[in-house]
Amino acid sequence: MKTAELDTPVLTVDADALDRNIARMKDMTETAGISYRPHAKTHKSATVARKQIDAGAIGVCCAKLGEAEVLASEGIDNILITTPVVGESKISRLLAARNQARVAVVADNVENINMLGSIAQLAGKMLDVLVEVDIGQGRCGVPPGPEAARLAQMIAGHPCLNFAGLQGYQGKIQMTVDPAERAAQTETGLDKLAATISEVENAGLPVDIRTGGGTGTAPFDLDRGLLTEIQTGSYVFMDSRYGGIGWPGANAPPFENALFILTAVVSKPVPDRVIIDAGLKSASNDHGVPAVVGIKGCVFEFGGDEHGILRMKDGGEVPLDVGDKLQLVPSHCDTTINLYDQYIVLKDNKVVDVWPVDTRGRVQ
Amino acid sequence: MKTAELDTPVLTVDADALDRNIARMKDMTETAGISYRPHAKTHKSATVARKQIDAGAIGVCCAKLGEAEVLASEGIDNILITTPVVGESKISRLLAARNQARVAVVADNVENINMLGSIAQLAGKMLDVLVEVDIGQGRCGVPPGPEAARLAQMIAGHPCLNFAGLQGYQGKIQMTVDPAERAAQTETGLDKLAATISEVENAGLPVDIRTGGGTGTAPFDLDRGLLTEIQTGSYVFMDSRYGGIGWPGANAPPFENALFILTAVVSKPVPDRVIIDAGLKSASNDHGVPAVVGIKGCVFEFGGDEHGILRMKDGGEVPLDVGDKLQLVPSHCDTTINLYDQYIVLKDNKVVDVWPVDTRGRVQ
């Protein structure tokens, strides 16, 4: 089947571009001698996770326990859950997931660590726990410094918990446009992590895993050499917004857009406006609007849950008719993919595979 | 099972509040003598559609063919698809759906009407088609006036198409805060529809169905008496943003919040910030942030795909600890529901049922 024959809107993957992105990140991390643990919250796919592991990744990150459960059941091993897992029910599920795969978790709270320990002991299992440090994100994580060392000692002191390392991640600087400014922001955050590593080591505990970093800060994270592994996620598909950031020595990151929304024109009531069948239920808006592929000067505007409105910047006639198909690049892949049950995989404009979005909606 | 025992985040329905909302809309439309065809794009549920039909609705609206296919297969009859269905593949699917239910569609384009007619003829079926008129939304729909009459005649002249009426809908005025201003905007739109009805009638065609209207404009739509049916959707659950609009003779609409996101605190790294497990993948942001229930002065901020950040407006300590659960009211129910596979139905804080979100993701 050819692309043009697909009903729309539909989420498509350029398989070759995806493979090139995965190879490029493997090369970057290999050159730097740092491990590569891509974040599966972007792609939500066991198939893509396997491709990354085949290309040398040591495992994956998940944002939620529910994602880890699905990927573990699909045979993905060595999973780090990058946010705290809280409450008796979820911690019991976490220990059950360890029957299928190595699953580690981060923590930033005394009561949570106590409960992780108690339930691990009841289950008769050892659990790897990392302490999350807030190095600038302002979300979860203990403040840098002695508090992290106190939690690390608590974990190390429990017979069923293993202190595995520290996590420090700054999501909000990943898209800082100026690479020099982004490099400086990365350094500031990593300085805080370095100080916290010293605190923990001074308390007598080795910090084996030092995990963090993202697609935008990867060159600086790799250059600094403080992290033992980086958690890059978006590089596999590249959000349209990432295209606008500078890269050391280049205008844009060395990754390609590999994810698209194929959409069709359903109405052209007047020449200067066409309506397409992709709206808020087909493209997330939290990083802005998707980009229109191949029509210079054509801009997308959300027209409600089910529709987008295209106009030319110069106010002229939109060069599309009812029934025409076109591609959009999502502004934010993670939240857009979560709207779909499957990827349609394309090579040379032909459908070659269909991959399920295995962890869509696994927010628990 | 009690609410407090549910894993989070989870989408919950207050079953009694939902029933009261449905009864209230039934009373309003019955008093006005206008039919009630609720929009199923809000709830995406055959169960809720059946409740509305049991309460006197003549059928439902769907935004996309994919929604209509699912509801038709669930036994819901008399479905109006409120946006054009374009292309050979989809029109064939539309005619196939008519084997299970009465399904009508809107159109605004000559080529589309020609294709609807050709495929209906090949299938040996009659298809009801309404002409969509743009009465102010600026999306699909022919401009008010003679163009609509021309399309109506085209439809009526085809042996396998039946001209069923006109649709005119203004989504963007539904949340105009001042009721007098909203009333005036409603009148302006309905004046355009009235003029178009005259054009079509002067061309010798009766306009049996005159469909439009929404939750915010319902009192004015019902008062004017031009529409034969109203398409109210949001009233079943009520978005938090609807709570802020005035209503004739009242501060707020006479419908209750019946939909909630139950979420839990997963981190409290500092006293003035707590992190909850509901982010962009659990609550849509296209109408702003969800509202926090029961904690005065506590505001939500999106903290990425998986997390929300709560703070007190006065900068004080947030009165919640790690593990505590709380409820949010979605700012926009339609797009929030689309993120979930099921509703957990509650009465008196106990789980009484689970309903699938039958048409989640049915964007094609």
Image (tube, coloured by chain):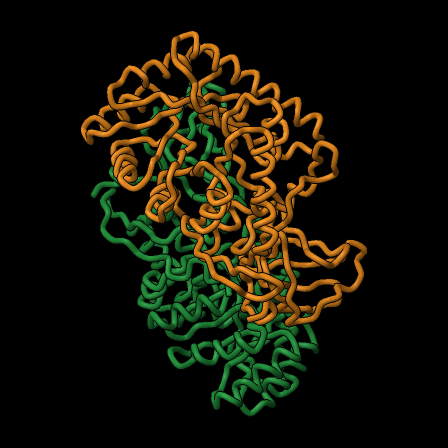
Chain colours: A green, B orange
Of residues A283 and B167, the one drawn nearer to the viewer in this rendering: B167
Q: Residue at x 53, y 89 (%)?
A: A121
Judged left or right of residue B122, residue B197 is right
Q: Residue at x 39, y 68 (%)?
A: A70
Res B304 → quadrant: bottom right
Res A271 → quadrant: top left
Instruction: Please determine whether, in this image, residue B60 is positioned above or below residue A235.
Output: above
Q: Residue at x 44, y 24 (%)?
A: B209
Task: State which quarter of the image contains the N terminus of chain B.
Answer: bottom right
Of residues A196 and A267, the one drawn nearer to the viewer in this rendering: A267
Task: Please provide percent x and percent y for residue A362.
Answer: 46, 62
Instruction: Please determine whether, in this image, residue A123 is positioned above or below residue A11.
Output: below
Of residues B55 and B89, the one drawn nearer to the viewer in this rendering: B55
Task: State which quarter of the image contains the C terminus of chain B.
Answer: top left
Residue A27 in sight from this viewpoint: no
Residue B84 in sight from this viewpoint: yes
Q: Residue at x 53, y 42 (%)?
A: A288
Judged left or right of residue B236, residue A67 is left
Task: Please provide percent x and percent y for residue A277.
Answer: 40, 35
Of residues B278 and A299, the one drawn nearer to the viewer in this rendering: B278
Task: Please provide percent x and percent y for residue B74.
Answer: 36, 49
